[in-house]
Amino acid sequence: MSDYDHDALQRAAKDHLWLHFSRHGAYADHDVPTIVRGDGVHIEDSRGRRYIDGLAGLFVVQAGHGREELAEAAAKQAKELAFFPLWTFAHPAAAELAERIADLAPGDLDRVFFTSGGGEAVETAWKAAKQYFKLQGKPLKTKVISRQVAYHGTTHGALSITGIPALKQVFEPLVPTTVHVPNTNIYRAPDLTTPDGRPLSEDPEAFGRWAADRIEEAILAEGPDTVAAVFLEPVQNAGGCFPPPPGYFQRVREICDRHDVLLVSDEVICAFGRLGEMFGATRYGYQPDMITCAKGLTSGYSPLGAMIASNKVMAPFLEGTTSFTHGYTFGGHPVSAAVAMANLDIFEREKLNEHVRETEGAFRGTLEKLLDLPIVGDVRGDGYFYGIELVKDSATKESFDDAESERLLRGFLSGALWEAGLYCRADDRGDPVIQLSPPLVADQPVFDEIEQILRSVLTEAQSRL
Ligand SMILES: Cc1ncc(COP(=O)(O)O)c(C=O)c1O
């Protein structure tokens, strides 16, 4: 049993804690799951039960739970200098971390603006793009293009970039200058044919060209002199882990260059080993103008985000009396920066990226065993980042309507997976998917256990259809 008082925690949580993205009504007659500790790839709740953390918290805990050296790095920094802002001052932890990130980031992404998290990094990139173009004498270049179903955060700017109408409607009006284009879900590719007569869904390269060209179409429709940036994740999370088709990012890069539009790689999930590289852009071989990142930078032992800009983007901010009139009290917090340094030490010492690259094939292969279940339509992703799309019938790809999806995901799957010992995500922001993103220290026995739990719960779900 856990040494926490389960009932007292339940009262405190239910009476006072406003949970994020949660239906509080659902807790009227259910416990709020309350996690009290973690160890490696496992977490433990206040009832003393252990679970596989199949989502690394929220795509965060790359190095695994319970790392004393990260806790010690935080304590050491707090004793020396607990806080100082980056508003016209520097401190060693932020300066050293900025230098290290600049070394790791692709190409000339050499300038690091720290934030407290991912949404703030997205806000920062958009504001930097707008001011960059004003400084270039192109004040109309303010708009952002991003993809349908993509999630980029919840602050007004980041939520405007987000392409999930259901998350936006109650907060309208948002920032009006965003446009959304199709994402790279080849499993649900539009019913079109390539010039040689093949379905688009069977030709990943043609599909990639088609999807990239939707971005150019949007830039031209809006007017290139009004578009500041394109925001894309290396592997799009919401909708269930869509990897880029071959050639997609290379073509997007050309399109951005042609129209003087900045390419922002939103790597809040995809950086720091999630795809077996420090940055997703490295994995897919493209050069963004900015990267936004957060989550895995500290493995979650302290909050931190960053916007990493190229020297080209920063250049006009270095002139005369110009300043980027933007900042966050806790951006680049000394404790978080020190934790990030220690976290990157673990990456190097334990070769976490190499581990992901060596074992991702086995992870994929283990999850693909589930394709023999008629309810499993597609298994997709890269690295340690996978989505399993659920369908009524894998032969027809027929999906669930909203009511069925509600019954399946919220009414059954989320609870059943949890009771079976697996924390992961059952997501219906696009078509229904289960998402997996375990700590990067996971290996074959963990993959097997995940597969077995999914198999038994999905078999039960199928029998309830
Ligand atoms: C791609 C992407 N961008 C931005 C965000 C927002 O990050 P945060 O929740 O740290 O504000 C997220 C969060 O999951 C994300 O996945």
Image (cartoon, rainbow, N blue to C red):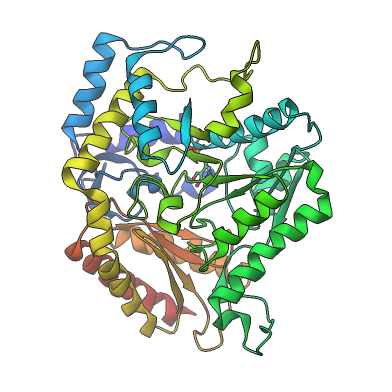
Above or below 60: residue 354: below
- Of residues 58 and 227, the one nearer the viewer is 227
Residue 357 at x, y percent in the picture: 28, 60
- Of residues 408 and 389, the one nearer the viewer is 389
- Of residues 255 and 192, the one nearer the viewer is 255
Residue 26 can be seen, yes or no: yes
Residue 384 at x, y percent in the picture: 34, 58
* Image point (63%, 69%), residue name: 209
Question: Could you tell me which quadrant the N terminus lies in?
Answer: top left
* Image point (66%, 70%), residue name: 210
Residue 180 at x, y percent in the picture: 71, 54
Is 4 left, or right, of 304 in this rendering?
A: left
Above or below 283: residue 298: above
* Image point (65%, 58%), residue name: 148
Above or below 320: residue 14: below
- Of residues 116 and 216, the one nearer the viewer is 216
Residue 333 at x, y percent in the picture: 40, 20
Is 335 left, or right, of 374 in this rendering?
A: left
Residue 120 can be seen, yes or no: no
* Image point (37%, 13%), residue name: 91
| Image mark count | 0
